[in-house]
Image (cartoon, helix red, strand yellow):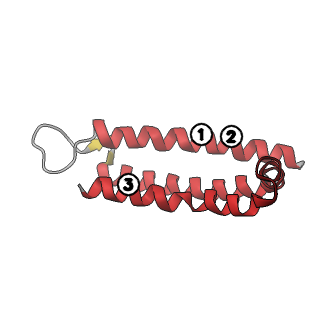
Amino acid sequence: MKKIFIKYLIDTMLFVDICSISVVGLLLAFVIPEGRTGWGSKYLLGLHRHDWGDIHLYLSILLLLLLVLHIWFSWTWIVQSSKKYFGDNWKNMLMCISGAWILVLAIAYIIKKF
């Protein structure tokens, strides 16, 4: 298979996976009740809330794997674009951008804590 077709398949699967994660997350947040409840069932389409949570987890793991493949197949473009925009400091900038997720997790942790 040609590389461009593989990239297309990976990107298509990423799109479907992100949409699926979003829908399941919205179901968990707004449709399927949590905790003890007397007014509604914790089942939707025959699956319990915990089953939906498991689906959400597995889709998220798939997302991470697809993102790794996406970055791997796009690595040449990433390096060339970084060199174009950041010049000689392109490696340092890629490291900063790559480490930004730590900052995002820290902020999310602090917000959730309060």
Q: Are marks 2 and 1 in contact (CB under 8 Å)?
A: yes
Q: Earlier in the sequence, mark 1 or mark 3?
A: 1
Q: Which residue is mark 2?
A: 12
Q: With 59 as the anchor, is 70 left or right in this view?
A: right
Does residue 37 appear in this view? yes
Q: Amino acid at mark 3?
A: Ala
Q: Nearer the viewer, mark 3 or mark 2?
A: 3
> Residue drawn at (84%, 51%), measured in percent from left and top?
80
The mark found on residue 5 in the picture is none
Q: Secondary structure at mark 2?
A: helix
Q: Residues within 10 Å of mark 2 (few under 14, many from 20)?
A: few
> Residue drawn at (20%, 41%), measured in percent from left and top?
41
The CA span between labels 3 and 2 is 28 Å
- Quarter in which the C terminus is drawn: bottom left
Q: Is residue 59 above or below residue 43?
A: below
Q: Which residue is mark 1?
A: 16
